Image: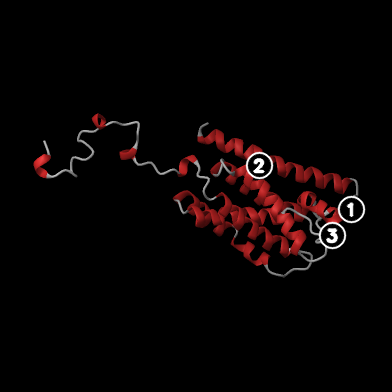
Amino acid sequence: MNTGKRLISAAKTAFIPVMILWIVHLIKVLGNFQWGNWGIFPRDIKGLYGIFLAPWIHGDFSHLLSNSVPLFFLTTLILFFYQRVAITSFILLYLLTGALVWVFARPVYHIGASGVVYSMVSFVFWNGIFRRNMKSVVLALVVMIMYSGYFAGIVPGEKGISWESHLLGAISGIVVSFMMKNYIESDEVEVDPWKDDDYTPKDYFLDRDAFDRPKNLRD
């Protein structure tokens, strides 16, 4: 699949969870439903449902929009550049973020996809640290510049904001990027043409070891 088709495919896939977020919220608003108690309530058995459901529930349209744009962009980016590990990483980021919130956060209901978004920002950034190839470093710099304002969200601040989800999502991103660091993408493999088994000495003008032999042994 060429680059353009891969990008379109990644964007189409990334649009699906964003579309589901909006459908869920529209049903909530139109039906005047109160789904806040389906969020994560830490250290309560009933609150375990929130690990799976909380990211799909938002308080208002502003909350929803603030998560939709970065979720779409980051999902597209990860699907496109980290194709080999993308799906596994998404699942781990989603579940680990929710589980950490359930274990460590304040005993209030936590809803919204912001924890997952923070985990994805962290995942891309730390890939640059752990993989240390040109692609991952550039992507790390891109997300650092675009989402530098997110750093303020990992400390206690505005009332009604789950800063724990942000912080624990960021920690999840570190853990998952470390777990996935050895799963190298096809475009990250360093190719040494001198060690390529597809070539034989006759493919080269000079023998590969021509300059390694003593002068008296050279032809």
Q: Nearer the viewer, residue 35 or 168?
A: 168
Q: What residue would you read off at disc 1?
A: 34
Q: Residue furthest bottom?
A: 156
Q: Which x, y percent locates residue 172? A: 65, 57
Q: Which x, y percent locates residue 121? A: 61, 55
Q: Nearer the viewer, residue 32 or 106?
A: 106
Q: What residue would you read off at disc 3?
A: 44
* The C terminus, quarter of image: top left
**Rounded to the nearest whole Å, what is the CA distance between mark 2 and mark 3?**
32 Å
Q: The residue tagged with tag 2: helix, strand or loop?
A: helix
Q: Residue at x 12, y 39 (%)?
A: 218
**Crowd tier of the residue under label 1, counting other residues whose Cα lies within 10 Å: few below 14, some 14–19, many 20 or above:** few
Q: Residue at x 51, y 36 (%)?
A: 3
Q: Nearer the viewer, residue 140 or 8?
A: 140
Q: Residue furthest top?
A: 202
Residue 142 seen by the camera: no
- State the mark number for residue 14: 2
Residue 61, relative to residue 14: is it above or below?
below
Q: Which quarter of the figure has residue 87? A: top right
Indicate which label's residue lies in the foreground, 2 or 3: 3
**Crowd tier of the residue under label 2, counting other residues whose Cα lies within 10 Å: few below 14, some 14–19, many 20 or above:** many
Q: Residue at x 53, y 35 (%)?
A: 4
